[in-house]
Amino acid sequence: LRAIPWIFAWTQTRSNLPTWLGAGEAINEILASEDGTTLREMYKEWGTFRTTINLVEMILSKSDSGIARHYENLLVSDPEALALGSKIREIHDETERAILDLSGHDRLSEDDRLLLRLMEVRNPYVDCLNVLQAETLKRLRREEEGSDEGEVLKDALLTTITGVANGMGNTG
């Protein structure tokens, strides 16, 4: 699988996994070590480092574990895949806590009022598109190739993909 479709798929399901995976574990490990104070100083004093952490924070704020879980509940039956999804959501939550700890924020992206407002307006619409997309995928998987219903579902799927991509506002 090439990188662009890989990133796109994780964004469509609101997991955004490739952008944050590993960040929380690394931050927690350093914060728990003798270098924890240095890492906090780096966040406060190094603009490029703070920007990197803030970008991870922004992506986490655009993620939604509940939406990701909805896709799994509707589309995944393999117990190992379900366990993996649960583990990914657990790591996501740990990463959020690590970013909040390092940044000193109480809420993800709390310094970015524009982003918070955009998400407040956007999320009800994108959430609905995600729910429709998962249901469309479920129905499409049951259809025979080339059926009239299948063609309608493919069109609906493309519409939801476009809507989610536009709503997310970055890759995806």
Image: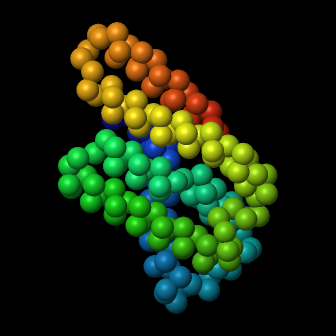
Residue 115 visible at all: no
Would residue 109 be found to the left or right of residue 133 on screen?
right
**Count of number-bearing discs:** 0
Would residue 119 be found to the left or right of residue 159 on screen?
right
Percent x, y of residue 82: 27, 55
**Residue at x-position 61% and y-position 57%:** 61
Percent x, y of residue 22: 44, 63
Can you say whether 154 is above or below 148 in the image?
below
Colour pattern of the rendering: rainbow
**Residue at x-position 40% and y-position 53%:** 69
**From the image, which quarter does the N terminus lie in?**
top left
Residue 63 visible at all: yes
Can you say whether 99 is above or below 61 in the image?
below
Percent x, y of residue 50: 68, 65
Name the foreground residue: 60 vs 56. 60
**Residue at x-position 41% and y-position 19%:** 154
Can you say whether 70 is above or below 159 in the image?
below
Furthest residue in direction bottom, as rendered: 34
Percent x, y of residue 132: 47, 34
